[in-house]
Amino acid sequence: MPDLESVVRDIAEEMRERSDRGDVATYIPELASVSPAAFGIAVAGADGEMVAAGDCDMPFSIQSISKAFTLTLALGKVGDRVWRRVGREPSGSPFNSIVQLEAEHGIPRNPFINAGAIAVTDIILSGHQPREALGEILRFMQFLAEDNSIFIDEAVAASEQRTGFRNRALANYMKSFDVLENPVDYTLGVYFHHCAIAMSCRQLAMAGRFLAHNGRNPATGLSVVSAERARRINAVMLTCGHYDGSGEFAYRVGLPGKSGVGGGILAIAPGKASIAVWSPGLDASGNSHLGRIALEALTQRMGWSVFGV
Amino acid sequence: MPDLESVVRDIAEEMRERSDRGDVATYIPELASVSPAAFGIAVAGADGEMVAAGDCDMPFSIQSISKAFTLTLALGKVGDRVWRRVGREPSGSPFNSIVQLEAEHGIPRNPFINAGAIAVTDIILSGHQPREALGEILRFMQFLAEDNSIFIDEAVAASEQRTGFRNRALANYMKSFDVLENPVDYTLGVYFHHCAIAMSCRQLAMAGRFLAHNGRNPATGLSVVSAERARRINAVMLTCGHYDGSGEFAYRVGLPGKSGVGGGILAIAPGKASIAVWSPGLDASGNSHLGRIALEALTQRMGWSVFGV
Amino acid sequence: MPDLESVVRDIAEEMRERSDRGDVATYIPELASVSPAAFGIAVAGADGEMVAAGDCDMPFSIQSISKAFTLTLALGKVGDRVWRRVGREPSGSPFNSIVQLEAEHGIPRNPFINAGAIAVTDIILSGHQPREALGEILRFMQFLAEDNSIFIDEAVAASEQRTGFRNRALANYMKSFDVLENPVDYTLGVYFHHCAIAMSCRQLAMAGRFLAHNGRNPATGLSVVSAERARRINAVMLTCGHYDGSGEFAYRVGLPGKSGVGGGILAIAPGKASIAVWSPGLDASGNSHLGRIALEALTQRMGWSVFGV
Amino acid sequence: MPDLESVVRDIAEEMRERSDRGDVATYIPELASVSPAAFGIAVAGADGEMVAAGDCDMPFSIQSISKAFTLTLALGKVGDRVWRRVGREPSGSPFNSIVQLEAEHGIPRNPFINAGAIAVTDIILSGHQPREALGEILRFMQFLAEDNSIFIDEAVAASEQRTGFRNRALANYMKSFDVLENPVDYTLGVYFHHCAIAMSCRQLAMAGRFLAHNGRNPATGLSVVSAERARRINAVMLTCGHYDGSGEFAYRVGLPGKSGVGGGILAIAPGKASIAVWSPGLDASGNSHLGRIALEALTQRMGWSVFGV
């Protein structure tokens, strides 16, 4: 059995030296200005240990990684009624495609493409003011990570609000099919803000622990969700967590994972670890280039793929 | 830890009594005449034990389940060059969709939709006569199952040949993009025949063992494929093995699996078991209705989902 | 040569008696409350004569018929640069489809589907305040019809504003590709208002005269557009004027035409007449059911099809 | 009124001198070897006169232009039942797209895309041997052109048979929906052969006369089809005759027309002339580049657009 600490340290070292780093997202200045040289990794193990390396304490914009947590919240709020408004099949399409929505009457294919995540946000929002809903999401992240310093980067949220025409198109399109209940601007406001949550790899790995441990916090033993629900969220992450690169991630890494355009990836090794990596350069599918490579190395060396022993 | 034998026996009993059985495929008479009352299950465990119940010894048409084995053969033959002719992303489309092929220049999205499996068959065929290629596939199945009585149902193959216009369209379409190397009729002939292989649940569970055990036959210890390749085939099965019902299968069952229109499903619990179920009634996505339900019950009771501990 | 007056009178009579009247649009209350019994027709001939019958003086919501006039205005304003932002091919899609926009990078297929008309409105708006642009459009209609009583139905505009989520999706989608220059809300405000212009058949037939007479007002001889531009607008009306029912309209009626969801159709018999019909019941493609039938009868009896002598 | 002879002579002269000639089709050697320098034009006027210039007597492969004549034959054989198997809406898609077929259950959008023309050929074939059906089509062309020397270029037909995988895909796809009645190979054999008919501009202009003159041969007064049917075929030619370049052709030329990949175009000026042009270089939509430009010049100078006086 390899030693996790040395594996993580080696990987951080290898990633630091690679010259292929992908392309940093440029659609808003706040993301464009992040250094492509950054790389961080943090692994929260089964016995409560934390192994981290590189820029593991630098906060980054978690962006779509938040979708795994809003899905968890929405399932907690309305249970399986979530699936009346969003499917759970891989889409075979880029993150912001609108084509599928037309064919399927405004029902997004899954909760991890933008349209689906907006619908999930709308579920969380219902019955609340936007500020309350957003507070609930942020507090959930702080609770899971056991760290109240986690914050929303208002500059990122404002930029997304100003330029998010494609997401506005998706939301209005769903609204035309009555898939959204709340005013489009309210739902999008909450959505843009929860995507703008800033976290470090260490905080993110902490937040994902319940998915690796049958729904429980392994340190306290407290249950966040049922074991079945944790399994099911992992299943959706594996089949849908990387847009039209989901098959590739499953093939190479072999773990449930959720990526964000900020360059972060949360990956879950059930029964073993919650893993966060971050490197801002992206591949053609919009997923962290070095992040995926680091996870592939980690699962191979640790034997953590869900598809082998 | 529940007892596998009693779990399997209970499930077979429960399935026998259910009145919801799905609809038997009717596009060829040979499949249409199969009794919807049939249900079989077989589990080949890690220590070489075999637990089976119901119609576990009745041969059925494995149809698309053969695609998992032809992919294995093609990877053995040309390695990763397979992926030049077929992708490995879920398609978000039904099994016989041609739309995706137009958008992606004749390259099928994955090896488990019909177009992709035809491309894989073409790889196996290259350099051989159809009869030789077909013999190689059949002998591979017999070798894996350790049973030379496995046969091709010629009546099924002949019916598919006579009525398979959609597959003929897919093959000609790929040929127009030079994705197929061999004459369309040769490739389709081999394809229709390997889909017409008849096997029982017991034989199929035996044949799948190498995927559950890091590429090795657990009884003999002989390696069929490398551990990495076994993991990767499992990954493709999980993300793509049930057409546009793949997300649903992952969500409910939590195992890599490959279904066939004859009502069979092969599922792999890595490190634990190779499982075959068969019930000819299908759900709306073309996957065995009771087969999926039986697998969901099995993984829940045994704790075999790859997404939990 | 049949007598136009008796032909028009006969058609109005026949339409009044038909029981198949299509379905009145119900998406906003202002349209839903219009009586399906209404039918009007007006024909403005080459020598300045006007023949009208039925509810020919009752104002109705011209809706998408306004798109023929906004295209004329935009061509007058920026010339062929219009075609940098909108194509001129039939779409093969319903009026509000968003699928085509994704495939073609936000460029609408033609100026008569909703997306294309919104892009055309954006061209007219550029450099102006919404109120000014709207005033320009309204005055253009009044000028063409020689009737200053033509007005915008504010209740209709307000309803469209409140419920037009699909159009808002289209506009935001184009904005994400920089196809729109102005704030989305400004452009949509002008768009919803010019669609809410109310006119009678008599007014509409007057307004269309320049298209039937090589760009000139046949009464005054004054030129509105060049002869070539009039021909080209007619060509776009014939190939694209009825959404995915354009081929059917050309096949049955044989004239350039533009329909609106309010039940009106403007048709142009080049060299002969500008024709307006109105009946609020729609067919499956969203075009006036009796309007199309009346035009088919008119062109057959008068020998006005552009496809025969 | 300009003089037709000098207009035609001028245009032939201008076309000879242009250096932009498009790209000759290269998918079969028989088309690839045609000189891009060729240009021919022939105009069959209302009073039986024929004006021709350039390579007007050189036979070329009429390819898809044959679809206008097979549609005429099929309408003569089964009347409006043709429209049960093929639509009459513009497709918004390239000539050989298969996407639309999947969405519309195997019914081609119109008779002038490849799929639609194959369905039309299948109608003509029903009840006959392929050889008989092909003979009927060829004799129809010879009869219309009053020239028994018109022939099928067997080398072209053989090349198309050998390489026509896309058409074979379309045909098998329709067969899977029972849209074709005959064996796929029979229908395709007739289709490939009628596309391989070779004609000169002079012969083609002669053959198209009935469409320009209300269904009659203007020389003999004999009726080929009814006036209404001639108008309707013209309408389908105008909306669908140039694939996804149909809107552009209507906009620029303003006449019903049908193009072929051999570089020919047949255009109809109702009441005035049947026009054939030929220049083998194609534009991006697969239509003759100089052919379209020559027709645009001809209709402008003669005032023949159907969209103006």
Image (tube, coloured by chain):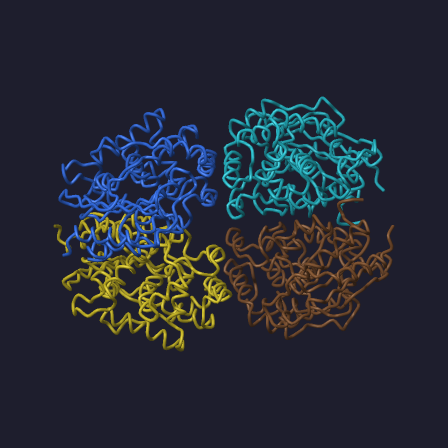
Chain colours: A cyan, B brown, C blue, D yellow
Q: Is residue C177 left or right of residue B22?
A: left
Whole-percent x, y for residue B128 in the image: 63, 69
Residue A222 versus residue C277: which sits nearer the camera?
C277
Q: Which picture quadrant has residue A284?
A: top right
Residue at (37, 71) in percent of width and height: D124
> Split into 4 quadrants, where in the image is the N terminus of chain A?
top right
Q: Position of residue C115 (x, y in %)?
A: 41, 39
| Image coordinates for residue A304, horizontal then vertical, percent | 78, 43
Q: Is residue D13 visible?
A: no
Describe residue D113's horizontal placement relative to residue A107 as left or right: left
Residue at 58% over, 69% down? B186
Question: Can residue B263 be seen from the camera position used here?
Answer: yes
On screen, C89 above or below A205? below
Image coordinates of residue C78 in percent, x first then y, are 30, 33
Between A1 and B16, the one nearer to me in the picture: B16
- Residue B113 placement: quadrant: bottom right
Count of numbered circles on the image: 0
Residue in front for this viewpoint, A306 or D278: A306
| Occupied quadrant, residue C219 | top left
Q: Is residue A149 above or below residue A98?
A: above
Who is closer to the viewer here, B126 or B171? B171
